[in-house]
Image (tube, grey):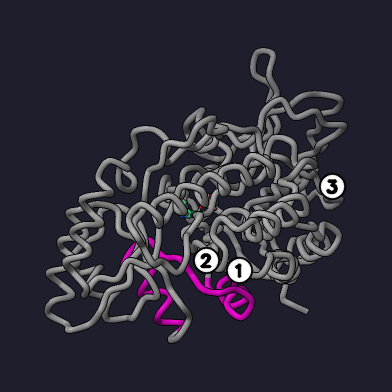
Amino acid sequence: MELRLAEVFASIRAVHADTEEPLCAYVYDLQALYQHVIRLVSTLPQGCELFYAIKANSDLPLLQTLEPLIDGFEVSSGGELDWVREHFADVPVIFSGPGKLDQEINRAIEQNVDCLHIESLNELWRLAEIIKQTGKVAKILLRVNLAVDDLAKTSLMMGGKPTPFGFHVQQLKDCLEWLRAHPEIRLRGFHFHLLSHQLDARAHLQLLAAYQLQVREWCDEYALDIDHINVGGGIGINYRQPEQQFDWATFSAGLAALVNNGNLLGIPMRFELGRYITAACGYYVMQVIDIKQSYDKNFLIGRGGTHHFRTPYAQGHSHPLHLLPINAWPYAFPRPEISDAKVSIVGQLCTPKDLLAYDVPIDTVRCGDLMIFPYAGAYAWNISHHEFLRHPHPTQWYLPVE
Ligand SMILES: Cc1ncc(COP(=O)(O)O)c(C=O)c1O
């Protein structure tokens, strides 16, 4: 996704000029999000559908920007389902996630979700009890924790090894037999989400090819008539080397070949991407409050911290950063600054874990300058522990779709 840094920085400067206190903010570039998704959708081959996994960021203006462009939303809780239905009466919704409550399954049926992704036999049996009372037919995918040969690992694996997610392949035969005796539950296909943080387009194509092959085998072996496979999310953002992002052009070209190779001819492939859709439209902004040296390390203390933006610490990376110099300095004493140094960027929390970036080489930074963290639009504000220390929440605004 193209970052529109000039537009974003101009907007941050404008808001900063009107702000008395040190700035701490989230900015979302909806125009960039719009352009990004138009590109994804227009380069996905026929036979592929794009859903957005709203757990990545369910902020309403983002969902409103995405809804007209994509095939629907993936939700993983009753809360997410209610949020989507409150604002989008008719959008197709798929409901997945482990540990579903009866009440959530009930809501999903009531709300006519397009598909339920079933994670276990217990969940399937509970669905059967619930659906019996409604006279409806439930449409499901079975999520399978598939073992894939030579699976290229990423830093976040949800399958291909023991995890709480999905069915073990050995349970499949019994499960399919049970389903045959329960026509009130219609098997529409299979769901896989083995990993997140995939940065390698070719490795991802290989994974999808393995899914296809496996599903073809199951269709033959069990005489199944399915209508799609869901290949999950998982395309990553390269936070460590932001100039080397996932190669979408290679991926979409390879995908076209995969879709047309005959393995699953005519059976659509559904994506439920989270991070790759919204990460790049968000920015977290902290103004430098203090500059300190401790032993042989330098620290920039910014307004805010991991209670707003937990992504770097959660993923164990040093987050990419832009510095925006600010000329105004409101005090009579000389402005603290540091030059030609490596710095760690921390926030206002009383814990050494409040670390957003480390060993960042800088030319010059002064107190009062702005630090801008890109790729803060997914698994950022919504996964952070906002009330820790009760600091105020960041200011938030959006650059509109033009
Ligand atoms: C089942 C499922 N689908 C999709 C996603 C979205 O993944 P990502 O944000 O890596 O695309 C997740 C993330 O945890 C998931 O668990």
Label placed on residue 47: 1
Quadrant of image for the C terminus = bottom right
Q: Verify CB contact (< 8 Å) between mark 2 and mark 1.
A: yes
Identify residue for label 2.
267
Q: Residues within 10 Å of mark 2 (few under 14, many from 20)?
A: some
Quadrant of image for the N terminus = bottom right
Q: Is residue 57 left or right of residue 188?
A: right
Q: Is the residue 393 above or below the residue 208 in the image?
A: below
User: Which residue occupies 39% across, 67% down?
Assistant: 225
Is disc 2's CB within 8 Å of ligand 1? no
Q: CA distance from mark 2 to mark 1?
A: 7 Å
User: Which residue occupies 43% across, 50% down?
Assistant: 217
Residue 31 occupies quadrant: bottom right
Q: Position of residue 40 (x, y in %)?
A: 70, 64
Q: Is residue 22 visible?
A: no
Q: Position of residue 357 (x, y in %)?
A: 65, 34
Of labels 1 and 3, the one closer to you: 1
Q: Earlier in the sequence, mark 3 or mark 2?
A: 2
Identify residue for label 3.
325
Give, as a single range, the part of the protein colored magenta.
60-88
Q: Position of residue 354 (x, y in %)?
A: 53, 35
Q: SS of the residue at dot 2?
A: loop
Q: Label 1 amino acid?
A: Gly
Q: SS of the residue at dot 1?
A: loop
Q: Label 3 amino acid?
A: Pro
Q: Position of residue 178 (x, y in %)?
A: 18, 59
Q: Label 2 amino acid?
A: Ile
